[in-house]
Image (cartoon, rainbow, N blue to C red):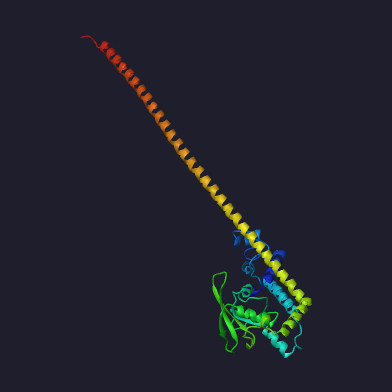
Amino acid sequence: MDDKIDTAEKKVLVDIVKLVQKKDMKGKLGGWKEFLKNHDKKFGAGLSDPSKRSHEVLAEFLKTFSTDEDLKFFDNIMQRHSNQYTLERPKDRSHDSPEQVSESKMSKLLIHKIPTTVNSETLHEIVPGDFTIEQKPARRDHRDKYSVLAIFKSQREALEAYENVQGSQEKDSNGLQQKLVTCRLSTGIDVSVYVRKMGIDNHHKKLPSKRDLPEEDKTLDTFKNKKLKMDPEVEKDDALKALRMKHEIEKKVHLKEIEALNQRLKERELEQLNEIEALNQRLKENELEIESMKEQLLNQRSKESELEIESIKEQLRKKDFEINNLHRMVDNIKKRQKPRK
């Protein structure tokens, strides 16, 4: 299940976390908000919207669940997403002509030998362009790696994306062109994947631009563009692009909010440090004052002791004088009482 969670798209993980919240499910580290409090010391549960959290944070939370019942629940949601994706794809391609099948195949790129630590978001960073991901079944002898198909809207987009992939050019055992791409994950680990074309490369030359086309082809291309503008599919694509742009704007807004929160936290930390410094200063002053009072008290006691000693000495001198007088008196009386001879 950990592998499935790591390779699942972020929107799937977001849906699972939202359902977990709704059902009040708890893993080894508690519920979603409890997990955030322990996992994120800066924001804690203050940023609890799953859609605003990274793929890694969502995956780490879901991995805290280990009971068979919870894992089965996660698996069912993933399966539901997979079934929905299958239904949304064109249902019947059995009547396509060989040319259509070939073009359909050429509008895909194979990304293979992907470590299970690499998620779909990272794949979108490796391969540029607008594409959907179709995961291929994992081989039994390669459980630590998996493969996907990057499905583009046209052959042109697939070829342009392949040309823009930053990697070293190679060929596989069947002579098909592929690129070896190395990237660094957020964990600091370097990983490598292969991006390969799906057919024999008959399109290694650059696609002709409008400037290179004959005048007749330019006119035809202009007509096609006008037709595309009225095509509902094109309108749908425009709506999707607008939605993506909206998401990008929202993402920037969220990033600015996070930066503002970070700034406020830094200011608060600075205020707390200043308060601690002021308290330490007051503590030192109080300690000095206490030492001074102790010294004064000792001096006062010392003076009182000296006075008391002098008083006792004076009393002793008086007692000695009285005793001496008494001795004289006794001696005189004794002398008087001596019998006469």
- Is residue 50 shown to the viewer in this render? no
Which quadrant, please, contains the N terminus? Answer: bottom right
Task: Give percent across and percent down for residue 228.
Answer: 76, 78
Name of the residue lying farthest toward the left: 341
> Left or right: where does residue 270 sit relative to residue 241?
left
Residue at image position (33%, 18%) is 322
The foreground one among 66 and 174 is: 174
Task: Give percent across and percent down for residue 61.
Answer: 63, 67
> Left or right: where does residue 272 sit relative to residue 46?
left
Task: Give percent across and percent down for residue 3.
Answer: 62, 75
- Tell me: residue 25, above or below residue 111: above
The foreground one among 312 and 108 is: 108
Residue at image position (73%, 85%) is 216
Name of the residue lying farthest toward the front: 215
Task: Give percent across and percent down for residue 38.
Answer: 60, 61
Residue at image position (57%, 71%) is 185
Which quadrant, please, contains the C terminus? Answer: top left
Which quarter of the picture shows residue 177? bottom right
